[in-house]
Amino acid sequence: MGGRLAQVLGAGNGASPMEYWRQPLDLDRVTIPHGEVRIIRERCKGCGFCVEYCPKDVLALSEEFNQKGYHPPEVVDAEGCVNCHLCEMICPDFAIYSVASQEEDQCEPIQQAS
Ligand code: SF4
Ligand code: SF4
């Protein structure tokens, strides 16, 4: 890695390589959204795409079978969903989607770096 780039990224000085050196100006107004996942079990073919690609590891394939004989996903970390809709976009069978959490106070302010 080049010297200046390594210095900026913190490599070799014990700092985290992804540590930011400045903060967004609107950090105090930005919140982390929360979502609720809806699974249409009987449409699912158990491909596991939603489980594999959820960035927050909210889902896992269940032990149960649907009527087609597949294992549909289940929610294993409901609090972790950030309503990004990735599971919804990636599902080839339109068997899963997310909606914004009904509780507005579920949005959390982003933690300010010290
Ligand atoms: S909406 Fe995003 S965070 Fe929530 S379950 Fe789907 S992929 Fe995961
Ligand atoms: S991506 Fe869709 S079809 Fe595949 S496991 Fe998830 S819900 Fe089922």
Image (cartoon, rainbow, N blue to C red):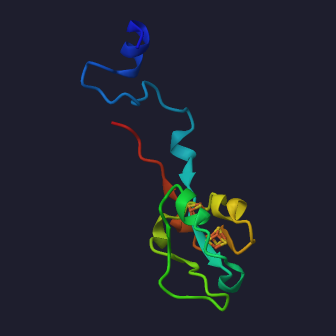
Outermost front residue? 69
The residue depicted at 66 percent of the width and 92 percent of the height is: 67
In what quadrant of the picture does the N terminus appear?
top left
Give the x, y percent position of residue 17.
37, 27
The residue depicted at 74 percent of the width and 71 percent of the height is: 93
Give the x, y percent position of residue 108.
49, 58
Outermost top residue? 3
In the image, taking residue 16 as reference, residue 110 lies left or right, namely right
The residue depicted at 46 percent of the width and 26 percent of the height is: 22
Give the x, y percent position of residue 58.
49, 66
Q: Is residue 58 above or below residue 5?
A: below
Q: Is residue 59 above or below residue 111?
A: below
> Residue 4's quadrant in the figure?
top left
In the image, taking residue 18 as reference, residue 99 lies left or right, namely right
In what quadrant of the picture does the C terminus appear?
top left
Q: Where's ligand 1: which quadrant?
A: bottom right
> Residue 71's quadrant in the figure?
bottom right
Outermost bottom residue? 67
Nearest the viewer among 99 and 11 is 11
In the image, taking residue 68 as reference, residue 106 lies left or right, namely left
Q: Is residue 88 above or below residue 102?
A: above
The residue depicted at 65 percent of the width and 84 percent of the height is: 41
Give the x, y percent position of residue 98.
66, 69
Q: How many marks?
A: 0
Nearest the viewer among 43 and 89 is 43
